Amino acid sequence: MSATRAAQAGLSVQGLRVVFDRFVAIDDVSFDVAPGASFGIVGESGSGKSTVLRAICGLAPLAAGSVALTGGSEAAAPASKSFRRQVQMVFQDPYASLHPRQTVDRLLAEPLAIHGLGDAEARIERALDEVGLGAGFRFRYPHQLSGGQRQRIAIARALILEPQVLLLDEPTSALDASVQAEVLNLLEALRERHGLTFVMVSHDLAVVTHLCQRLMVMQRGSAVEFVDAADLAAERVAADYTRSLMQASAGFRREAA
């Protein structure tokens, strides 16, 4: 992974619709994320925000709509091998997202083998350094790591393919508050260093406004409102639902920039 890299790709999602057994989980959701920008999706449990991420990366079936990389990046069909290399996802629970019987070394080597990338030794060492873990973690198993260390490994696994877009599904909600701050600061540093484009899902307004510049508020599978983080912090919002989310978000104290 190169030490620095300019923003290469943004993301365009248009008319997204996801249906499970006649239940409409996502209904006509559209948004654009500029190259190198960070975009947040918030809403109550069951609002469909995580399903949007899964649809983007091919883990949920599209009934309608399109997903495309933008900004002059190499064209890649959604759900293709090339697209999946350029768009990587970090899941909510590091306890569940890492195979318990594989060492860190094998967890990081597997995506390299799938995508036919060489120089695995150097790539694995660089990926561990990127997330603040040394070579001493290479041959440990997930149960030998703390929750924060597990999530750092999950981030390293996503970064090792040098993606252009990173999808973050509640990446800190399973961690202690003190560890949450460390992981959020790590993610922001990685985004700035490599010009990554972020799409982050969270139910915590304080967390998502810390990392994201613009947000989409979702309710019952639809977009309710789009708002800048600074406007949300200053309570300059239009939808009553957004106001109710702010009231329900305990400890939400971010001040307007």
Image (cartoon, rainbow, N blue to C red):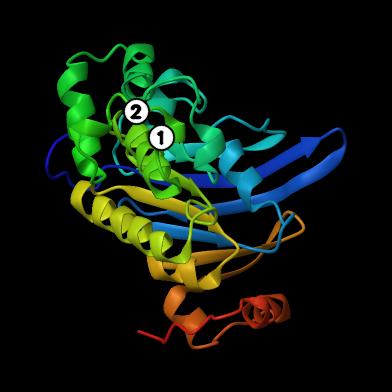
Q: Amino acid at mark 1?
A: Gln
Q: Position of residue 28 (x, y in %)?
A: 69, 50
Residue located 44% across and 32% down the image: 142
| Residue at far right of view | 22
Residue located 39% across and 58% down the image: 38
Rendered view: 197 above or below 75: below
Q: Is residue 58 left or right of residue 75?
A: right
Disc number placed over residue 144 in the picture, else none = 1
Q: Amino acid at mark 2?
A: Arg
The residues tagged by marks 2 and 1 sit, at their Cα atoms, a distance apart of 6 Å
* Residue at image mark 2: 140
Q: Is residue 38 left or right of residue 57?
A: left
Image quadrant assignment for residue 83: top left
Residue located 70% across and 42% down the image: 17
Q: Are marks 2 and 1 in contact (CB under 8 Å)?
A: yes
How packed mark 2 is, by other alpha carbons closer than 10 Å (few <14, some 14-19, many 20 or more), is: some
Q: Position of residue 135 (x, y in %)?
A: 19, 31
Image quadrant assignment for residue 211: bottom left
Rendered view: 203 above or below 232: above
Residue located 44% across and 82% down the image: 254
- Name the foreground residue: 130 vs 72: 130
Q: Secondary structure at mark 2?
A: loop
